[in-house]
Image (spheres, rainbow, N blue to C red):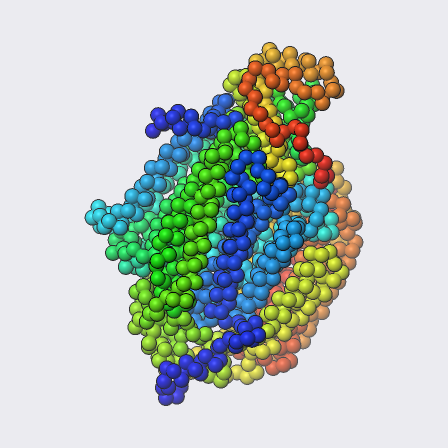
Amino acid sequence: MSEPISPIRLHKQLERIWMTPSGIGRLSSVNHTVLGKRFMVVALTFFAIGGFLSMLIRAQLATPHSAFIGPEIYNQIFTMHGTVMMFLFAIPMFEGFVIYMLPKMLGARDMAFPRLTAYGFWCYLFGGMILIGAMLAGVAPDSGWFMYTPLSSRPYTPGINADVWLLGITFVEISAVTAAIEIFVSILKMRAPGMALTRMPLMAWYMLVTSGMMIVGFPPLILGSILLELERAFDLPFFDPTRGGDPLLWQHLFWLFGHPEVYIIFLPAAGALSTIIPVFAQRQILGYRAIIAAIVAMGFLSFGLWVHHMFTVGIPHLALAFFSAASALVAIPTAVQIFAWLGTLASGKPKWDVPMLYVFGFFFVFVIGGLTGVMLAMVPFNTQVHDTHFVVAHLHYVLVGGFVFPMLAGIYHWMPHISGRQSLYRLSVPAFWLIFSGFNLTFFQMHLTGLMGMPRRISTYPSNWGWDWLNLSSSIGGFILTMGFALVLADMVLQFRYGRFFRRDPWQAQTLEWATATPPPSYNFAAIPRIDIRADGLEPARIGPVQAGGAGYLGFAREDRQETMGVDMATGAPEHVMILPRRTYLPLWTALATASFFLAMLFGFYALAPFGALATLILFLLWPASLGQKRDQGPVDIGMGEKAPLDVECDSNVSVLANRAAIVMDATLFASLLFGGLFLLVVAPNWEGMTPLDLPLWLAGTALAAAALAGGASLLARRANGRGGRGGPWLLATVLGQIAAVAMLVMLALALPEPTAHARQAVILALISYGALHCGLGGLMAGHGYWRLSQGYVSARRQTEMVLAWLWNLYAGAALVPALGLIVLLALEGATP
Amino acid sequence: MLGATPLLLAGCSGELSALDPAGPRAANLALLWWVMFWGSVVLFALVMVLFGLAYLRSNLIARLTPAQWIVGGGLVLPVPVLVLLTGAALVLGEQLLPHGQAPLRIGVEAQRWNWTFTYPDGIVLDDQTLHIPAGQPVDLAVSAADVIHSFWVPRLGGKIDAIPGHINVIRLQADRPGIYWGQCAEYCGEGHDIMQFRVEAHEPDAFADILARLRDQRPASAQPSPLRGEGATEPPAPLKGANRRSGGGQ
Amino acid sequence: MSRPDIRALVLLIAGFTLWSAAFVLLYALQALGCAYDWGAAHRPILIGTYLASLLPLAWLALRRPYETGEPQTSLSRAALWANRAALGAGILVFLPVTFATTCL
């Protein structure tokens, strides 16, 4: 740009743009470093709460005939222990880690949608507070963390306990949904120039697959929660076997999410291991490409396992055989990774340090969990130990081995990056041995407890079954484990307070995150380096001072804008300059509006809930106001003597990619709904003796025609705009078409007889609502495009809004086809064949 | 390897222990467990030894190439093990299925937090005791009236879920007359921990006598089972009976 | 999508995407056959679907990788491994259609 300036001045200029203010202004932060740390601190707080609950469980089970807490309280405690650990600790913990670390590893200055990160954080915090608040009020969920119906349905859980789970967890899951899309898009588009996909550190590959899995893994759970809440709130019988519903539908939807979820938790941890092990082996990872193939295989195979949680529900043996075989086969990509790590250590010059202690703990614990996992995949054996303490032992070996030990290795490895100080080690080693021995003492003999017949989730037991000493020793182990965690906490506090400072890259790691200053500045890199070799073989100590001096891409502060590089998805060639939104309170306000919706639903003020949803929507519509350009600028200087256009002038920008990902997610939710409808039609009890429904199906046909016309008009709008013509009238036509479609669908819904009488009508109502909602959304996107067009933000080069309007209208029309098809199929059920 | 099994078994006996089988089906499942257990011990030891060797810088493994690590450890080692194990388990699973008709089929209905057993000739027992003939397979058609439960007699075989709206069949067999304990294995609310029941297996002749006697007693089904306390060991089950919680829900 | 690097990226997930589709299809056919009592036709339909699903998987697993430069060389070698894994998973996971009891 102009003549070089000193690193200090450059730092001050960039810091002024990117920083988070102090005081109340902290609430406006959208910075990934700040939000990543917040995610992790809150997640660790929930980990402590979940750990405390587990202490209560072990205290209760330590002796037979325990009178410590009765079953009413105990049921809430074990439900909350599982819920907190899975949804409020494990997932948000790795999200926080990734939000903090990923841009630094890839050479970006932030995530793709900083305000969405902040919104996700607030949703997570508020949703978690709803759950904890309910527990303190004594009305925590008590149906087990997988909430099987009918136990969680209104007749058997009349209080708000189950609503707390369904609404609280769905609220929290918003953060997972936003994080998934953000991580996916950020990895594909926001890397240091030159970093081709095959030069990314493996952590990025792990997270790319994980985020893809989240995009298709979470929708079934969200749909299931919505349907169950609809059943509880409005008596729509999706899961009620007496009215054509089926409790097994809930199990399918839950585990369709629940099993991939285990791998969603494991893969980021495995990514951390693939980053840490090469550092301590002092050589690059062995089998980079084989590991990529293994991650992909694992990502897909993990979706073929869900029924292994349902081996005893009476599914035919052939179907069980598919899932049994897939469950066994998933051990193979796991073995590929395990042996790649072992080989990396064996062929390097391995050195010991505290992170490696936890890596050893991982190998020991996770391999046992994996082996018992293969055992559980065998259908006959599963019928003995399913729902016993054997499964409790297995899942703790897998999750603690596969997540907590790698997490602790990661904490000791990366904490110096966050604190800028190194650990003192006096407490680290004894803390590890307490955790390691306490864990195994708690859970190893629990395998035997289960084999000797102790089911999960019983609050007490007589002393004649031979379980006494097993339980007592597990409880003692549990308390040793807790002492270990307390020592780790003390160790962390001491490190922040008294740890010794270091220059750069204390472990001689070879990844880019160590090229930032430590603690990192708000903008990460004063200039983004060019990466011409694989990014797990870099020299951060050399890159660090160079980038701090402003040598590299975007090594300047321009027009108070938060700029970072957008690259070609595959090759990493510089493609465009991204301008990120700056700090704002909007995410907080939007999350509060969302919270008002969830609270209105929770407390049964159903008439108020739409206002919360409307407020959320209006606030979201304010988000784009500060973004965009009113004139075409052409390529701008990006340093290194190169030029690139701004993001709004590039039609492969992150907004378009993110909306494509969101549509995939939405379509998965819809596919789950279609699956649910077909499942009930084919399998559920009480569908005999039906007569065809008298529905005005011409309304459905008209709605489809209107939506199809709207979709066509949105395409014409985009084409006209791309040619430099007028897209506005076509957008207005789109809006009108979708209004007509929504009106037809609403009339169709009103003509539906007795939606609460049978699951058939309930499913039809859900399908109509889904269609109407998406036609409305298409109209809204078209209207938004028109507004942006009239404001001057859209041109033949700046056409993001037109593309988005087209995408969502196309999807709305496409979704109506199977929705209406299934409606017809359901309505005709009972007609003569 | 399997030679050590009886020794270990001594510590695994118990009235609800899956490792103390009392019927051919449970025995097969226990055998499957011991095979998998010893296999797992070997594989676990292998991984730990390799980890140890990596740190001791043994020349034994330092020269292995990446391809050898990944193909050897990731494919050659696990694929045959998994294929054989899964295949064997599927064949065993086929044998355990309730093919055709067993000589006797008993209806089982779970309701919070009780079990009701219905015999072919209409006898209904709700004193938490299931009578079966020993030495022959019995089909149990399991369902539930309210929430999901699970029917499990560990010493006789695996479990099957009791799901409202569905009827699931499980086949069990006891080798000898005696008393075997069963319980609900799927969490079903506040009374989950007391939802146990007895299975009394009788010689076929004695079983026929009992059925005849029960048929005469009908409908006084609330009376205790005629065989309660007879002969076989009966562990005290202090949580059962008197303080059984009832009502709620429904 | 005509760039070799993007095609290699698509190939990376192509095999397992097909595998997933075949999985869903076979599971659905198994359930439909039991619900609507296809009787003796049930197993031949399942076996036919099994074999048909292996054809595209085999084609992907035997394809030659793009080796015209980075990143497509590395990507398509990884893709080849993934697609061979998908073929193996297809052969093994769906093999029970040949013998396991369909509706019990």
The total number of labels drawn is: 0
Kindly tell me whether residue A637 is visible in this rendering. Answer: yes
Using residue A465 as the reference point, say whether residue A202 is left or right of it. Answer: left
* Quadrant in which the N terminus of chain A is drawn: bottom left
The residue positioned 65% from the left and 77% from the top of the image is: A787
Kindly tell me whether residue A319 is visible in this rendering. Answer: no
Q: Position of residue B81 (x, y in %)?
A: 37, 37
| Residue situated in front as seen by the camera: A325 or A468 | A468
Image height of C12 relative to B249, above or below? below
The residue positioned 20% from the left and 48% from the top of the image is: B59
The residue positioned 53% from the left and 39% from the top of the image is: A61
Q: Position of residue A693 (x, y in %)?
A: 76, 46
| Residue situated in front as seen by the camera: B49 or A243 | B49
| Residue situated in front as seen by the camera: A787 or A603 | A603
| Residue situated in front as seen by the camera: C4 or A580 | A580
Q: Position of residue A174 (x, y in %)?
A: 58, 60
The residue positioned 55% from the left and 68% from the top of the image is: A118
Image height of A573 relative to A701, above or below? below
Image height of B187 relative to A741, above or below? above
Q: Quadrant of residue B213?
A: top right
Q: Quadrant of residue A188?
A: bottom left
Q: Position of residue A79 (x, y in %)?
A: 58, 47
* Quadrant in which the C terminus of chain A is drawn: top right
